[in-house]
Image (cartoon, grey):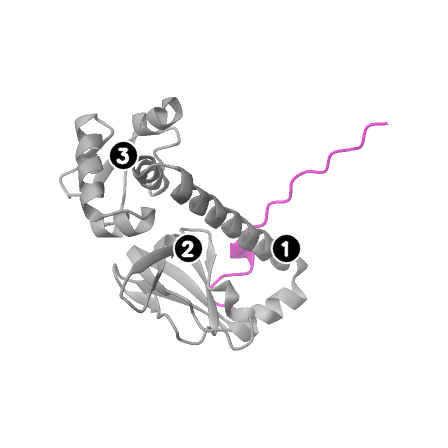
Amino acid sequence: MARERRPRLEFDPRRFVTGRGVGQSRLRSAPGEIIWTQGEPGEEVFFIEKGWVKVSTVSRNGKEALLALPGGGEFIGTRCVIEDYRRIGTATALGDCTLVRITKAALIQLLRQEPDFAQMLVTCVVSQSLRAQRILAEQLTDTSERRLARMLLRLTSAAGKQKCEPILMRVSQADLASMIGTTRGRVSYFMNKFRRLGFIDYNRQGYVMVHKRLANALVDS
């Protein structure tokens, strides 16, 4: 007898993360605004409602490395549940962001009282860990050109049905270089190449427009 397949459970974080619950507050961050600083105590978690956040660390000799680039619908700062945890990187808003701040005490209470929320958060943390491993593997095995192409596509919805989508934030070539682990000069070279090939363009506001053909080129190459 065939086993009945259970429907996949879909959890909406907004059921629990409203910005109005106990220990919750909504905040808006302008482009370049610091959400938390490397080395400070981790006492809260954030849910990104809209926008992108860059989490990066700086070594003692001043070299910066990207740790994560979470976007809308994701949690950041989940390691705050670790006792005496201090942030290993700085979180910076890329473009206008809307976030919900949840205190550590409120988060722990939600985890204890709401099994659906606990399962959802575990799934989120595991997914982010898998993404970080994939990014590390790409850093070691893929070219910087392909890493840049993937990053541009991730920052838009150009991989979907739309023919062309803008990156709705001003990301500098230095930021892109940090995100993919290369130099600003290499990013400039590849961006010019992508533009010549018709993979990207710039609109009147100066935002990068990413065309779907960039995704097709990645698949074909």
Instruction: Tell me where residue 77 appears, x and y as whole percent.
Output: 46, 64
Main SS class of the magenta portion in the image: loop
Q: Which mark is residue 119?
A: 1
Report if residue 11 lies within the magenta region: yes
In this figure, which residue is indicated by the disc labeled 2? Answer: 49
SS of the residue under disc 2: strand
Identity, as a three-letter code, of the amino acid under mark 3: Val
Identity, as a three-letter code, of the amino acid under mark 2: Glu
Q: Residue at x 41, y 43 (%)?
A: 140
Q: How many marks?
A: 3
In this figure, which residue is indicated by the disc labeled 3? Answer: 210
Give, as a single range, the part of the protein colored magenta: 1-21
Q: State the residue lying farthest toward the right.
A: 1
> Few, some or many C-alpha atoms within 10 Å of disc 2 (few <14, some 14-19, many ≥20)?
many
Q: What is the C-alpha distance between the residues marked 2 and 3?
A: 23 Å
Whichever of callouts 2 and 3 sits on the residue coming sooner in the sequence is: 2
Identity, as a three-letter code, of the amino acid under mark 1: Gln
Whichever of callouts 3 and 1 sits on the residue coming sooner in the sequence is: 1
> Few, some or many C-alpha atoms within 10 Å of disc 1 (few <14, some 14-19, many ≥20)?
few
Say whether residue 207 is visible. no
Q: Is residue 214 above or below residue 83?
A: above
Q: Nearer the viewer, residue 7 or 64?
A: 64
Report if residue 96 lies within the magenta region: no
Q: Is residue 95 above or below residue 106?
A: above
Q: Is residue 147 above or below residue 49?
A: above
Q: Nearer the viewer, residue 88 or 22?
A: 88
Q: Nearer the viewer, mark 2 or mark 3?
A: 3
Instruction: Tell me where residue 34 appears, x and y as whole percent.
Output: 30, 67
Q: On the picture, is 156 further left or further right than 46? A: left
Asked if the residue under mark 3 is in contact with the one under mark 2, i.e. CB atoms within 8 Å, the reply is no
